[in-house]
Image (cartoon, rainbow, N blue to C red):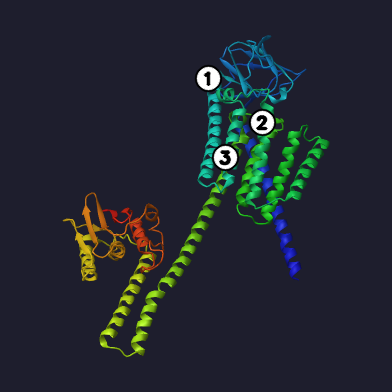
Amino acid sequence: MLYNLKMKLTVNRYIKAILVLSIAVLSIGLIILALDIVNRNISHYIGTTNNTITVNNSFSDGLYTIEDLTIQDDEIVLNIFNQEGKELSLLLDYLKYPHEIYIDGVLVSQNTVGGEATFNDDFAYKLFDFTDSVKLTLRGENLQLTTFYLAEKKHMDHYTEVRTINYCFIFLCFASMGLTSLIFYLSNRYSKYFLLLAFIGFMSAFKVIVLGELFFITEIFKVTSKNYQSINNITSLLNIFLPIFITMNIYDIKLGRRKRVAVYIFLAAISLAMLDLEIYVNWFGTVVLGTTCIGVIVQFYGIVMKKEFRHIILLNNVIYSSTSFYKDFMDTNQMPKGTVDFLFHITYIGAVIYLASFILIFFLRYMKQVKSLKEKEHEFERISLLRGISHDLKLPLSVIKSSNQIIEHYDMPFEQRKKYMKTGLEATKELEKMTENINSYLKIGATKSKDMTTSIHDSFERLKDHFDVYNQEKKYDFSVVMDEEDVLLPMDPVQFYRMVFNLVDNAFKYTREDGKIILGYRVKKDVTIFVKDNGLGMTEEKINKIFDPFYRIDTSRSNEGLGLGLSVVKGIVDSVNGEIQVESIIDTGTLFKIILPIK
């Protein structure tokens, strides 16, 4: 029965995944139709009669896509009768193949013979201005790929400017995302996938250059109509495969050697099948379709296994696939081109969203890892705190216990009994000091309050009275230096007292008898509190560690305490946006400075 239940749940998950993917496919179709409707509504079309256009007063403002052009013998002959003598511009879009262009029978542009005056290798588009009637002839082997646009010169200038701005924007988007990913990688080298995303971003930016739209950059990288197709195919394959690889990482799909071989065989089989079906006539198209199939399988796995970020990745794929297929439909003349295709390379808009989504996913994963690490650090700190407390509390407790046991079980003179009572009392005071430090450590972060103020002068008077009692035998030269001006700080008085108390107590602990200890403060723009002694001093290495919880300069643990005192000081100072400075020289002494803002 349990087996049947598991099988039912598994089948339900598969059915759900199929439904989700079906909805995704339907969404792709709807988005493509929506893009086509938008394109048709904002575009103007002008038809031809026997490849002839007549421009008269009815030729209104806007950009016109020329339709119904016929190709004969690898040649398009377009006649434009300009009856009104308008300043017109004709733009030939996509010339990434060997071609020749004639105007009124005169060769004006070609990209086959270098060194000639007519040589022009601008392959994104070519623009011709005229005011009279013209006869334009385009010769080449892939003429069906070229789109003709016609407009008044002033409008064409505007549209080409917007087009260049759009491609610059796309280029900057890819470049900035690549740079952002690289910065994330350099700051967190364990996340190698940020480096991969940086590579995809920079490569996508390079693909925008390869398109030939940004002429000045294209020339720098020596991209020409002759090497365009090779560069485009290689970068396109990488851009298709790498996101699948990243998605597999997000879904924690790890392929062993046999599975990798199976994937390669699958790709080869898909390629051969597509060649037999003549769906694509080149290896590039078949590999693209093969990797697309793998992407669908990976997405199906993510949905079935309920992997994290599966919804974002699915939406990502829907958007990118919609823009890619829509571009393919326009390029194969299954849907009309128009203003949308003129102004944007719609696939790259989808690619920008695609890459941005992956960066967002990895950023969210990174933040989750950081949060997890912090939680582990807090847990480790909590465990260390408990271990430190359990260890260090044993000493005063054992002293109290042994003193009381001796007093209870042995007869002794009153003076000796008094000595053991004093030892127990001192251990009790040390235990009290430890618990106060523990409480202060746990309360760090709640020290600043608008409802609480602390008088430095009053706190220092209390500290002076306490340590005068502690130093009543005058073993140390202890003095307090106070500024004439008193200041009210927005702090909990108990926490302020604990902060300064720990510094002074630390000075007494690590200063030899007859040593000198000075506590003081001065007021300028900020309040500077200082504790100076001529005690043991510290090395630079120890200065860098003294604020760590449970760190003690005396590693033999002969000194009393938990090693939390200076951690408490640092925590309280940080919580009120203060600063703590330490200067120390071995066998000369140490100076602690706390700088606190008055407001």
Residue at the extreme right: 276
Tell me residue 454's x, y (percent): 25, 61
If you read the primary sequence from the N terminus, does the residue marked by circle 1 or circle 2 appear first? 1
Q: Circle 2 — which element?
A: helix
> Counting other residues with Cα less than 10 Å from the Cα at mark 2, is it few (<14), some (14-19), or many (20 or more)?
some
- SS type, badge 1: helix
Q: What element carries label 3?
A: helix
Percent across and percent down for residue 137 are 69, 14
Residue 198 circle label: 3
Amino acid bearing label 2: Asn
Q: Is residue 512 toward the left or the right of residue 148 in the image?
A: left
Q: How far apart are marks 1 and 3 (CA)?
A: 40 Å
Q: Nearer the viewer, residue 464 or 471?
A: 471
From the viewer's perspective, is residue 278 above or below residue 243?
A: above
Identity, as a three-letter code, of the amino acid under mark 1: Lys
Which residue is found at the position 21% from the left and 52% from the top? Answer: 523
Image coords of residue 241 (percent x, y): 68, 41
Residue 32 visible: no
User: Which residue lies under the disc numbered 2?
Assistant: 232
